[in-house]
Image (cartoon, rainbow, N blue to C red):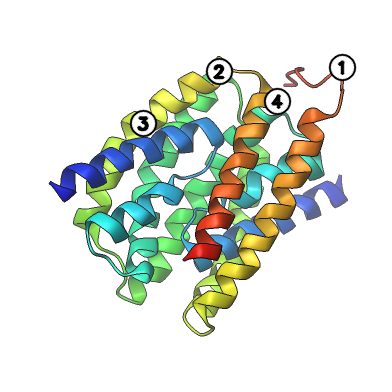
C-alpha cells in the first residue's frame, strides 16, 4: 500500500514537472504511467488523470501568471469550444475498446514527440 | 478568421482531451501559436488556463461513467505542485530545445510500452475493475 502511494506520488511529481515545462497538462505522462506501472484499465487511467490535471493545471497556471505569461481572452477562445469537445470525447470513449484507447494514446505520444523534435 | 480556426482547434483539443484523458494542450498550444500569434511560452501558459475548465467538465463526465479513482487522482494532483514548481522554474532557466528533445525521447519510449501491452494477448484486457 505504501509503495503504491509512493508510485502515485512519483507519477504526480513527473506529471507536474512536464506540465510546468511544456504546458501539456501532465496527462501525457500520467495516463501511460497509470496503465504501465499501476495496471489501470485505459478508461480508468484517463478518468483519474483528468482529476489530477484539474489540480495540476490550476497550480501551474497560477505560477505562470507570476511570470506574466497568461492571456485570458485567448484561453477562453480555445477553452470554451473545448468544453463541448470534452463532453463529446468522453462519450465517444465509452464506445470503443480499451486496447483502442491505449493504441490511440500511443499515437498521441508519437505526434507529441514528432512535434517536439521538429519544432 | 484566425479566431475561428483557433476555436475549431480548441474544440478538437477538447475531444482529444476527453477521449485520451489529457487536458488538450497538445492542440491548444499550436492553435495559439499558429492562429493567435502567441509566443511558445505564452501559448503554453495560456493553454493551462484553458485546460482547467475543460478537465473539470471531462472529469465530471467520467465520474458519471464510473471511470475515476478519486483518491488516486487527488494523491497525484496533490503531489504534483512539487513537480510543477520544478518544471516552471526549469523552463524559465534552461534551453527549450533540451527540454523538447528529452520529452520527445521519453514519449517515444512510453508509446512503445503502450503498444507492446495493447498487442499482448491478455484475456483480462477488456475487464473493467471498480
Q: Position of residue A71 (x, y in %)?
A: 25, 62
Q: Chain of mark 4?
A: A
Residue located at (51% from left, 30% from top) = B19
Q: Chain of mark 3?
A: A
Q: Is residue A59 positioned above or below B86 on the image?
A: above
Q: Chain of mark 2?
A: A
Graded by Cα atoms within 10 Å as few (under 14), some (14 to 19) or many (20 or more), the crowding at tag 4 reads: many
In the image shown, does A114 or B76 lie closer to the viewer? A114
Question: What is the C-alpha distance between the residues marked 2 and 1?
Answer: 20 Å
Question: What is the C-alpha distance between the residues marked 1 and 3?
Answer: 33 Å
Q: Chain of mark 1?
A: B
Q: For the residues labelled 2 and 1, say whether their Cβ atoms are less than 8 Å apart.
A: no
Q: Is residue B101 positioned above or below A10 on the image?
A: below
Residue located at (40% from left, 26% from top) = A87
Q: Is residue B37 positioned above or below A31 on the image?
A: below
Q: Secondary structure at mark 3?
A: helix
Identify residue for label 3. Answer: A85
Identify residue for label 2. Answer: A94
Q: Residue furthest bottom?
A: B93
Graded by Cα atoms within 10 Å as few (under 14), some (14 to 19) or many (20 or more), the crowding at tag 3 reads: many
Query: Mark on residue A13?
Result: none
Identify residue for label 4. Answer: A99
Question: What is the C-alpha distance between the residues marked 2 and 4?
Answer: 12 Å
Q: For the residues labelled 2 and 4, say whether their Cβ atoms are less than 8 Å apart.
A: no
Amino acid at each position: 500500500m505504501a509503495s503504491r502511494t509512493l508510485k502515485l506520488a512519483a507519477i504526480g511529481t513527473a506529471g507536474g514537472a512536464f506540465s510546468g515545462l511544456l504546458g501539456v497538462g501532465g496527462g501525457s505522462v500520467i495516463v501511460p504511467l497509470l496503465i504501465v506501472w499501476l495496471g489501470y484499465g485505459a478508461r480508468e487511467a484517463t478518468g483519474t488523470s483528468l482529476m489530477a490535471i484539474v489540480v495540476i493545471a490550476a497550480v501551474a497556471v497560477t505560477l505562470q501568471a507570476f511570470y506574466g505569461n497568461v492571456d485570458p481572452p485567448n484561453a477562453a477562445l480555445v477553452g470554451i469550444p473545448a468544453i463541448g469537445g470534452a463532453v463529446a470525447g468522453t462519450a465517444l470513449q465509452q464506445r470503443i475498446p480499451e486496447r483502442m484507447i491505449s493504441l490511440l494514446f500511443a499515437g498521441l505520444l508519437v505526434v507529441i514527440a514528432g512535434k517536439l523534435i521538429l519544432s | 478568421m484566425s479566431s475561428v480556426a483557433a476555436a475549431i482547434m480548441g474544440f478538437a483539443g477538447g475531444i482529444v482531451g476527453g477521449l485520451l484523458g489529457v487536458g488538450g494542450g497538445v492542440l491548444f498550444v499550436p492553435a495559439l501559436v499558429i492562429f493567435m500569434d502567441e509566443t511558445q511560452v505564452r501559448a503554453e501558459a495560456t493553454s493551462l488556463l484553458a485546460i482547467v475548465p475543460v478537465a473539470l467538465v471531462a472529469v465530471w463526465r467520467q465520474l458519471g461513467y464510473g471511470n475515476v479513482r478519486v483518491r488516486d487522482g487527488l494523491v497525484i494532483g496533490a503531489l504534483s505542485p512539487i513537480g510543477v514548481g520544478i518544471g516552471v522554474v526549469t523552463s524559465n532557466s534552461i534551453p527549450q530545445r533540451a527540454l523538447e528533445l528529452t520529452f520527445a525521447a521519453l514519449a517515444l519510449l512510453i508509446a512503445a510500452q503502450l503498444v507492446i501491452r495493447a498487442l499482448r494477448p491478455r484475456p483480462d484486457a477488456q475487464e473493467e475493475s471498480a
